[in-house]
Image (spheres, grey):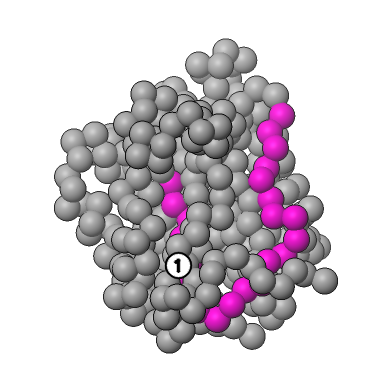
Amino acid sequence: MIRIQMASCSDKGARNHNEDDLRLGVARNGCYAVLADGAGGHKRGAEAAARAVQRIEGMLRDDAVAFSPSNLTRTVYLAHDELTHHQDSDAPESRMHCTVVVLWIDPEAEHALWTHVGDSRLYRIRHGYTDVVTSDDSVVQRLLQAGLITPEQMQTHPQKNQLIAALGIEGEVEPHTVARPVELMEGDAYLLCSDGWWDHFDDALLARTLAEALSPQAWLDAMRGHIEAQRRPRQDNYTAIAVWAGDPGEVTRPGADDTRPRRPFA
């Protein structure tokens, strides 16, 4: 069984309050990490994020919920229903909503599942290579996929922060859940983070800070130091969860492997 280590970090940045929220832990059905980035008037973004992560954590800690993609997707639907039920208004500008990203690991079977809605991301670093295993539900991501803008243009695009999906929006959501459990490998490092965090990093910097870290918390501390050093006057809330499978430092050798799962779940 692969040893799982986890750590977290969250900060309000230059904002008056923090609308990000997170949960992580170990349950009978596996290890889990949940992160949400809230938005909405009158500080309801914080409420949206808190309700979402609490609802998802409750499901993942339920012994009756088996480790499966369908059950993980169901937890996100239930979180969306939770927010919808507690809306104060049907007006789009008054609704609370949030992004969410979830990682669920079965260390005994050595498999991982993940899902997301919105633009909070999940990264995986394997053997020195960084892979964003989620795809943002955002306007600029769709423009990039259509070949209308470049990755560099995404950083300054006027619609950079415009989402096309989030929990709590009017109507249905479609969680992006992996179709089957993905092979977990010794030395894999996962990073769940809100846009206030990932906006500061490219793939190479994530891998470099990982290579220099001796623990998940040390990795987060190094990245947090990088964010604080930039002193952005309008810094958004920034939140991250680091999840290590074993010790990445023992197996990280750039060029030894790619970042895609090699063996499908049978």
Residue 39 shows in the view: no
Residue 187 shown in magenta: yes
Magenta region: which residues? 172-194
Q: Position of residue 198 (x, y in %)?
A: 38, 49
Above or below, 238 against 8 in this view is above
Give the amino acid type for the residue marked by disc 1 in the picture.
Tyr
Q: Position of residue 197 (x, y in %)?
A: 36, 49
Q: Is residue 75 left or right of residue 244?
A: right
On-image quarter of the N terminus: bottom right
Q: Position of residue 118 (x, y in %)?
A: 55, 38
On-image quarter of the C terminus: bottom right
Q: Between residue 171 and residue 184, name the one nearer to us.
A: 184
Residue tagged 1: 129
Above or below, 198 against 104 in this view is above
Question: Measuring 36% from the left and 70% from the top, which residue is drawn there?
Answer: 210
Image label count: 1
Q: Main secondary structure of the magenta part?
A: loop
